[in-house]
Image (spheres, rainbow, N blue to C red):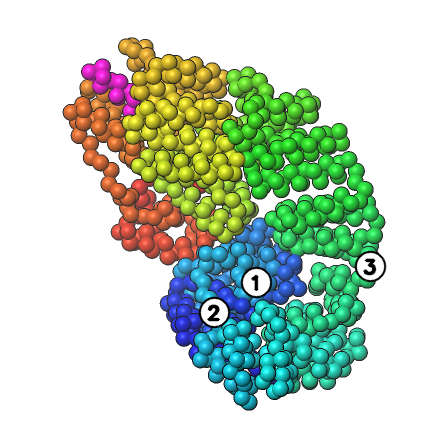
């Protein structure tokens, strides 16, 4: 059978056809492209897809259609799309192959990160496109399951040098598709709409009635075709048959329901079975329909009316027909259809679909069905389908007869929903859990989950009291979880910073001190809590030994337990910064990036990249830092997670552009609105940094003093460093002395070369004669043993400035030249210019740094070039950077052109080193 009678016509659509033909042209020329067609139901998106497929006869085409009934089945639509290509799965790199196989239920294994699945799909599509350009078409994308939508949007954003086209059609695209190429499909112009209406209404219409139809359908082709059906000429001519004001899809669906009512009962039953089974498998549909006594002839009236065809698969005239069929059926009729489908579904090959049908067929609470759903939730989660697991557990909760077990399942469902990024669902499930009898531990877990949801939404202190309450409730029954909740509470107070109540952190620390785990606990999170409690209850100097123990514990755990490192990195990184421990900063961030890349944890990788980028900034590797910031931002656009701006801001601050202070003032205002006091402190610190670089010491002093008003974890020591310099150069000796006393307490307690080098430098700034000279030399000697090249360069700078004032011009020139070369090489423009001016004052000259990098490479090209220089193959580079091998090859070809080389072997000499040691 050909296309269903009455399919929405393509009509003219010159604008839309030109855009889609352009996409095909790009794909044929080897450039990957993605496009989202959006528009209301019936406006002609599917007709445009058919046109595009017809124009792609020279390409391989794979298709999928989102199904509302499958929105909670992980990877359902993705599997339909790539199933024809799975004969190539063995060609994928091992981790990608395993991730995809587990996601599709082809093998057992640990739950894959969905973005590792995305990389596998990207590689699979690129591999298939090597033989022949590939077009992927996804209709009704608004009904994709969450896992499929995230993977496909990830793939769409990574297309570049692959001959792959990816077209989505959706009524209202989900947030995952925001930012992709977009084409709105609008209603027909009035003249074309009138012509289409005349083709189905072959008698004269009252002009007012005609205009009303044209206005209310807004040129929607399907509405123009369907609204007149089932209405007599008298009803149409006078306008009496037109329903009152409704949205176009509802009007069209109502028209379909009128047509359904005229069909035989057995035909409507067959259509209901097909509507309840979204895979469209004709064998399964006929098997289930047969169990309900439906004969094979029942399909003929539906086919004759152009509503349904069942051939190689079942296909409705339009998704609104499916919706109309299902909504028109009674509850008992739907239960019967789902029950028949459950009996007809193979429990071995499709246990999740079978259980889902059983759940919809259940008349009342049923423990056997609830238990099966609970077991399958584990299977779904093992495949990476956290959203599907949450949906199964939610339905299991509804079908559980025993109140205590129902509460436990609701709590488990809520925990899974939080992990799936569905906080609203989680809150409803927690309310359901609280309706039943809960143990003390379960009550504490409910409170903890509520608080975690608040913390994820608003980090600036709103979650603090709920977290403390949850920790207190869990402490008598589960001290380990209680202590983790106290760590979360301290973290919330750290975020609140200066905007919290006075003494807030000390109060929280004292409360957490009551939850003792005993002296022998070695769990890293336990050690972390003890260190943070000491830090805020006793002070920095007194807590330093315990903070060092924290860093030792996490250094050990980084290799053996990456999960702990990833979960608590945001706090342990701040502890390492507080302790001026550059080695631990480097190691924790490097381990975190490596672990996240190896397991494909894109939910965590942007955070790890941010901290790794900051380490690069301290090392003077600004280009490497910019590359990681760019990568982090690109991933966050795909995942939709909160933006990590720390490293990007640090880079802006050290570069010292004139626009930086205004940027930081704006960000501080934003942070104030979100009650994130620590972010305000960070903006004040970085503004002081910029002004010190630009020689505006009074301004630097004002901002540094404001930053110092609150003791921010991982920040105050850096503020004191800037404050001493600004106060000395800004002629505020009392401020300098006060800041130096506090800095000395902290750096002496920390005891690292970074800390003691900073202390020697700061003491030298307020000293004179030989004492100052010795302190500057000590500072340089200590900082040369660290990774913090930016602080070493700034020490050469202030030493050179002091030597010049002492009229030791030759020595001054040596240190100023060193400072200028280092700072210029880093890209620290403001400090480099300050060094250049000082050099001029000694009688020497120094050229300004040319804008841009000498090689002209973009950050991503530089990162790929460095990895290639280290001997990684294109697939290995692609796996690290979540790119296809073909895109890596494309970037390398541009690198070769810019560096005027012809092979990878020449990269070692042609590529500027810059000290980058990988990410």
Q: Which residue bears the numbered disc 1?
A: 142
Q: Which residue is mark 3?
A: 364
Q: Would you name the residue on which mark 2 appears?
A: 185
- Between disc 2 and disc 1, whose residue precedes? 1
Name the chief secondary structure element in magenta. Answer: helix
Categorize mark 1 by other alpha carbons within 10 Å: few (<14), some (14-19), many (20+): many
Tell me where the magenta segment starts and ends, as one range: 797-808
Left or right position of 556 against 158: right
Q: Residue extending furthest right?
A: 402
Task: Tell which circle, 2 or 3, labels the residue nearer the N-terminal end.
Answer: 2
Q: Is residue 480 left or right of residue 806?
A: right
Occupied quadrant, residue 696? top left
* Residue 584 falls inside the magenta stretch: no
Label 3 packing within 10 angstroms: few (<14), some (14-19), many (20+): few
Label 3 element class: loop
Q: Position of residue 408 (x, y in %)?
A: 77, 45
Give the x, y percent position of residue 688.
37, 28
């Amino acid at each position: 059978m050909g296309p269903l009678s009455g399919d929405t016509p393509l009509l003219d659509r010159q604008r839309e056809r030109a855009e889609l033909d352009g996409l095909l042209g790009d794909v044929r020329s080897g450039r990957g492209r993605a496009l989202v067609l959006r528009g209301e139901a019936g406006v002609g998106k599917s007709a445009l897809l058919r046109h595009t497929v017809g124009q792609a006869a020279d390409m391989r085409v794979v298709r999928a259609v989102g199904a509302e009934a499958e929105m909670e089945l992980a990877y359902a639509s993705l599997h339909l799309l790539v199933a024809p290509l799975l004969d190539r799965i063995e060609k994928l790199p091992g981790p990608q192959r395993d991730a995809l196989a587990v996601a599709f239920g082809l093998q057992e294994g640990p739950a894959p990160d969905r973005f590792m699945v995305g990389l596998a799909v990207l590689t699979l599509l690129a591999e298939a496109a090597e033989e022949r350009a590939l077009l992927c078409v996804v209709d009704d994308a608004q009904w994709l399951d969450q896992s499929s939508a995230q993977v496909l949007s990830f793939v769409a954003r990574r297309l570049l040098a692959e001959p792959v086209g990816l077209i989505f059609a959706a009524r209202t695209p989900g947030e995952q598709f925001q930012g992709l190429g977009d084409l709105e499909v609008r209603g027909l112009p009035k003249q074309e709409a009138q012509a289409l209406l005349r083709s189905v209404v072959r008698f004269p219409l009252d002009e007012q009635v005609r205009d009303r139809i044209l206005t209310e359908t807004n040129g929607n082709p399907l509405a123009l075709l369907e609204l007149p059906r089932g209405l007599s000429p008298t009803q149409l001519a006078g306008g009496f048959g037109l329903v009152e004001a409704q949205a176009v899809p509802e009007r069209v669906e109502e028209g379909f329901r009128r047509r359904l009512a005229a069909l035989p009962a057995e035909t409507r039953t067959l259509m209901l079975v097909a509507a309840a089974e979204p895979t469209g498998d004709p064998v399964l549909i006929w098997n289930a329909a047969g169990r309900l006594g439906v004969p094979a002839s029942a399909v003929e009236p539906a086919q004759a009316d152009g509503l349904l065809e069942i051939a190689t698969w079942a296909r409705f005239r339009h998704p609104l027909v499916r919706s109309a069929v299902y909504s028109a059926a009674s509850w008992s009729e739907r239960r019967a259809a789902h029950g028949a489908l459950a009996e007809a579904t193979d429990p071995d090959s499709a246990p999740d679909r079978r259980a889902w049908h059983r759940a919809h067929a259940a008349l009342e609470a049923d423990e056997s069905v609830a238990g099966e759903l609970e077991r399958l939730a584990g299977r779904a989660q093992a495949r990476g389908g956290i959203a599907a697991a949450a949906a199964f557990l939610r339905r299991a909760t509804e079908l559980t007869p025993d109140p205590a077990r129902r509460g436990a399942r609701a709590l488990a469902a809520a925990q899974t929903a939080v992990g799936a990024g569905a906080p609203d669902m989680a809150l409803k499930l927690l309310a359901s859990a609280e309706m039943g009898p809960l143990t003390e531990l379960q009550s504490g877990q409910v409170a903890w989950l509520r608080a975690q949801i608040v913390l994820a939404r608003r980090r600036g202190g709103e979650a603090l009291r709920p977290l403390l309450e949850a920790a207190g409730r869990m402490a008598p029954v589960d001290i380990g979880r209680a202590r983790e909740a106290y760590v979360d509470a301290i973290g919330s107070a750290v975020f609140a910073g200066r905007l919290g109540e006075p003494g807030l952190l000390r109060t929280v620390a004292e409360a957490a001190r009551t939850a003792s785990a005993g002296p022998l606990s070695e769990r890293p999170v336990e050690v972390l809590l003890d260190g943070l409690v000491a830090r805020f209850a006793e002070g920095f100097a007194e807590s330093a030994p315990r903070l060092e123990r924290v860093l030792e514990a996490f250094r050990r755990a980084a290799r053996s337990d990456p999960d702990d490192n990833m979960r608590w990195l945001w706090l342990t990184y701040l502890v390492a910064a507080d302790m001026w421990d550059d080695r631990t900063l480097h190691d924790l961030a490097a381990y975190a990036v490596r672990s996240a890349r190896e397991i494909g944890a894109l939910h965590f990788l942007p955070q790890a990249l941010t901290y790794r980028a900051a380490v690069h900034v301290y090392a003077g590797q600004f280009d490497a830092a910019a590359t990681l910031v760019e990568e982090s931002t690109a991933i966050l656009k795909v995942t939709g997670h909160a933006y990590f701006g720390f490293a990007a801001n640090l880079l802006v601050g050290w570069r010292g552009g004139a626009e930086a202070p205004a940027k930081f003032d704006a960000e501080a205002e934003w942070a104030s609105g979100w009650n994130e006091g620590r972010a305000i402190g960070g903006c004040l610190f970085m503004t002081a940094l910029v002004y010190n670089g630009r020689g505006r010491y009074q301004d630097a002093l004002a901002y540094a003093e404001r930053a110092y008003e609150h003791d921010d974890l991982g920040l105050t020591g850096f503020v004191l460093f800037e404050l001493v310099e600004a106060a000395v150069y800004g002629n505020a000796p009392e401020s300098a002395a006060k800041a130096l006393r506090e800095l000395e307490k902290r750096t002496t307690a920390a005891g690292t070369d970074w800390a003691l080098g900073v202390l020697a430098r700061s003491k030298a700034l307020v000293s004179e004669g030989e004492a100052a000279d010795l302190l500057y030399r000590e500072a340089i000697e200590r900082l040369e043993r660290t990774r913090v090249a930016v602080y070493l360069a700034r020490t050469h700078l202030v030493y050179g400035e002091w030597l010049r004032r002492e009229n030791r011009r030759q020595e001054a020139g040596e240190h100023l030249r060193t400072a200028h070369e280092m700072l210029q090489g880093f890209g620290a423009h403001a400090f480099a210019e300050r060094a250049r001016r000082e050099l001029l004052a000694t009688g020497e000259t120094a050229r300004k740094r040319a804008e841009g990098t000498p090689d002209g490479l973009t950050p991503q090209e530089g990162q790929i070039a460095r990895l290639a220089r280290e001997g990684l193959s294109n697939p290995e580079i692609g796996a690290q950077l979540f790119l296809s091998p073909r895109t890596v090859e494309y970037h390398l070809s541009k690198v070769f052109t810019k560096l005027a080389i012809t092979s990878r072997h020449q990269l070692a000499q042609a590529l500027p080193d810059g000290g980058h040691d990988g990410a």
